[in-house]
Image: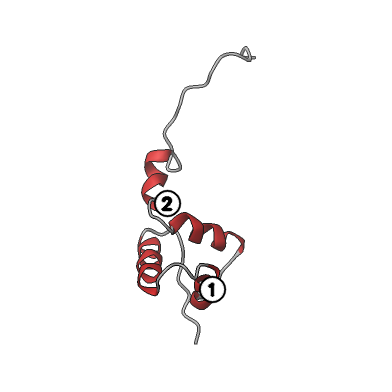
Amino acid sequence: MQPMNQHLPFVPTPLSLPHVQPLINGKWRLAMLYSLRQGPLRYKQLHAQHPQVSEKVLVFELKDLVERGVVERIAYK
């Protein structure tokens, strides 16, 4: 058994800060991801939760998050 004061070595993982920072780097990204934490939202629902974000910025941020694989876009017919 290891002594309690002995620290384990830091092992970089895909969830370490250098990997996550570009995903949340943006004025509205973290707020949008926070809104999506409980499940899927339609575009208008997300925009209603963040009316201060312009549609242009919201579309740009969502497209970038989809390209990075952070969120998934589902097209409803």
Could you tell me which quadrant the N terminus lies in? top right
Q: Residue at x 37, y 58 (%)?
A: 68
Label 2: element kind: helix
Task: Please give left or right for residue 59 compared with residue 37 in the image.
Answer: left
Which is more toward the observer, 14 or 58? 58
- Coloration of the structure image: secondary structure
Q: Please rate how many residues cluster around mark 2, counting C-alpha atoms within 10 Å: few if below 14, some from 14 to 19, many from 20.
A: some
| Residue 27: quadrant of the picture | bottom left
Q: Residue furthest bottom?
A: 77
Q: How far separated are the C-alphas under marks 2 and 1? A: 20 Å
- Image coordinates for residue 16, horizontal then vertical, percent: 44, 39
- Image coordinates for residue 17, horizontal then vertical, percent: 42, 39
Which is more toward the observer, 19 or 35? 35
* Residue highlighted by disc 2: 24
The amino acid pointed to by label 2 is Ile
The amino acid pointed to by label 1 is Ala
* Residue highlighted by disc 1: 48
| Residue 53: quadrant of the picture | bottom left
- Which of the two marks, 2 or 1, is nearer to us in this view? 1
Mark 2 near mark 1, Cβ–Cβ under 8 Å?
A: no
Task: Please give left or right for residue 17 compared with residue 38 in the image.
Answer: left
- Image coordinates for residue 73, horizontal then vertical, percent: 45, 71
Residue 18 numbered mark, or none = none
Q: Residue at x 52, y 70 (%)?
A: 46
Q: Please rate how many residues cluster around mark 1, counting C-alpha atoms within 10 Å: few if below 14, some from 14 to 19, many from 20.
A: few
Label 1: element kind: helix
